Image (cartoon, helix red, strand yellow):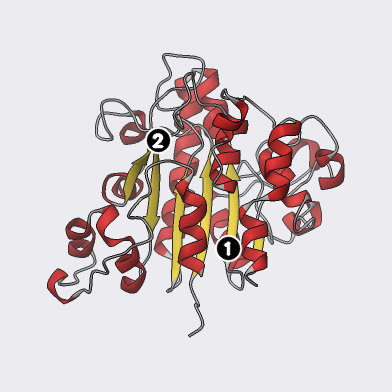
Amino acid sequence: MKNNTKVIMIMVDGFGIPVAGWNDSVYAKYCSKEFMDLLVNYSIPLDAGLGVPGIPQSATGQTALFTGINAAEAMNKHHPGFPGPTLKKIIKEQNIFKALLKKNKSVIFANAYVKYSIEKVASSRFCSVTSCMVSNTINSVFNYKSLLLNKSIYHDITRETIAPEHNITTILPEEAAHHLLNVSKNVDFTLFEYFMTDVAGHSQKEDILKKILNTLSSFVVTIKADLPDNTLLMITSDHGNCENLSVPGHTVNPVPLICYTKTSSLFEKLFPFLGAARIYKQLKIKISSVYCPKKTVLSKAKSIIDVYNLIIKILD
């Protein structure tokens, strides 16, 4: 039987779980109630430390997230910023796009490359994990024209950071959400990367974080509200940061894995790990009538490494 499931994944950089919990946090302060509902009722904590001493960083964290390989262990340290030769080799040999394409699944990176082409980015020392992944697999990205046609999403969601330079009109987060939903319509796996949360965390400025979280919140809850059937919305991160403005760098806090769908059969696969009673109560489905399989795709998920296999199993 053909699997018609689709996954929309949003990787939110520097988005950790506060030590004091969700209710007494910057998220509760600046995000909508609907967004908080996702954090409180539809998420689980994932370890971002990967068993390696030190503060989790972007290059090793995102490599682990998108390859299923313990990149920090491979480097014997947490590596910041952009991947070097060792991590690029790992990404080239194994990544979520490559794995899904081998299974005849369609994949897409929803971020638009406006300032520089993927070729220029890939050949520079500022090539991110996602850009490295794209350039070694699909090697086709959205550009300025696609953005103007509302067929892609800029990394800041609202286009504010490029509006003056490129004479582009800014848009609302809700509009960008519908653009992402349209992009994902005929694709098995859609990835969007948002790193303004990490920027806000490093700034240690509450007014910046307030604006960023408000944007992210509005974007996500619109996607949630209009999410098609048989589609899983997955949101996670590479490491903590913005949840604690008292420090200028990253944190050792776990990160959330949010999994939301309107399709009960998908929740059956996620059932034991996400808190079945709470979720099914909200979906108004009787738990007694729901089959709980002995083996589930999330039964062993504990760290960001496990997200890779989760995506593959959900779409397989």
Label 1, residues with CA under 10 Å away: few <14, some 14-19, many ≥20:
many
Q: Nearer the viewer, residue 108 or 226?
A: 108
Residue in the image at 36% along x and 33% along y: 17
Q: Give the amino acid at mark 2.
A: Asp
Residue 227 visible to the viewer: no
In x, y percent, where is residue 218?
45, 48
Residue found at the very far left of the displayed protein: 288
Residue in the image at 47% along x and 24% along y: 207
In x, y percent, where is residue 146?
76, 59
Tell me if label 1 and label 2 are in contact, CB under 8 Å. Answer: no
Indicate which label's residue lies in the foreground, 1 or 2.
Answer: 2
Tell me the quarter of the picture where residue 213 sits: top left
Label 2, residues with CA under 10 Å away: few <14, some 14-19, many ≥20:
many
Tell me the quarter of the picture where residue 187 sits: bottom right
In x, y percent, where is residue 178?
55, 61
What number is the disc on residue 47?
2
